[in-house]
Image (spheres, grey):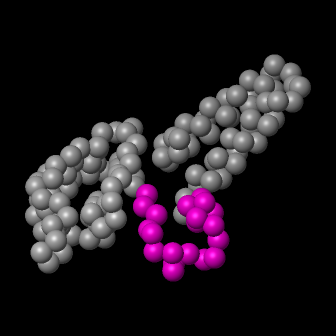
Amino acid sequence: MIHANNLTKQYGPKILFRNSSFQINPGEKIGLVGPNGNGKSTLFRVLTGDESVDGGNISKSDRVRMGYFSQDIENMSGSSVLDEVKNSLPGLANIREQLQQFEQKLTEEMSEVEMNSILEKYGEAQAEFERLGGY
């Protein structure tokens, strides 16, 4: 869980947010939308600890995992955005590939014993994928 209480952030006279509070519960997936320059990226940097707030506080459960893909493309290695995101979490990408291999294998003819074995492995991989934040 992430709990933000009375967050305030401004740059000079520009107030990005004042006394803003919110909570993100376990399992929730959220998106933040709005016009350019209104503080979306700043809020993400605050949540990841890369930037401080002028007021308020943030508390996060020890189990919280966050991913943030910066809009600063100078740091990209020349690959596509999709590849950059995939490469940022190699464990997740490997499990996704395993899941796809299991899915392909399940389209083939096999014995019930083989199918049950693959389904069991698939279930374990799916649970690990979700634990790492995949969906």
**Residue 85: % across, % down:** 56, 61
User: Can you say whether 56 is above or below 76 in the image?
Assistant: above
Q: Is residue 80 magenta?
A: yes
Whether residue 99 is visible: yes
* Quadrant containing the N terminus in the rendered view: top left
Residue 87, quarter of picture = bottom right
| Relative vertical location of residue 75 with respect to residue 48 in this rendering, above or below | below
Q: Is residue 17 magenta?
A: no
Residue 92 screen position, x and y as percent: 58, 52
From the viewer's perspective, is 45 left or right of 113? left
Q: Judge by depth and name the residue closer to the eye, 18 or 110.
A: 18
Residue lying furthest top in this view? Answer: 112
- Residue at position x 64%, y 47% from top? 96
Quadrant assignment, res 79 = bottom right
Q: Which residues are magenta?
A: 67-87
Total numbered circles: 0
Viewer-proximal residue among 12 and 105:
12
Residue 52, picture quadrant: bottom left
In this view, the residue farthest toward the front is 35
Residue depicted at x 35% and y 48%: 63
Residue 48 in view, yes or no = no
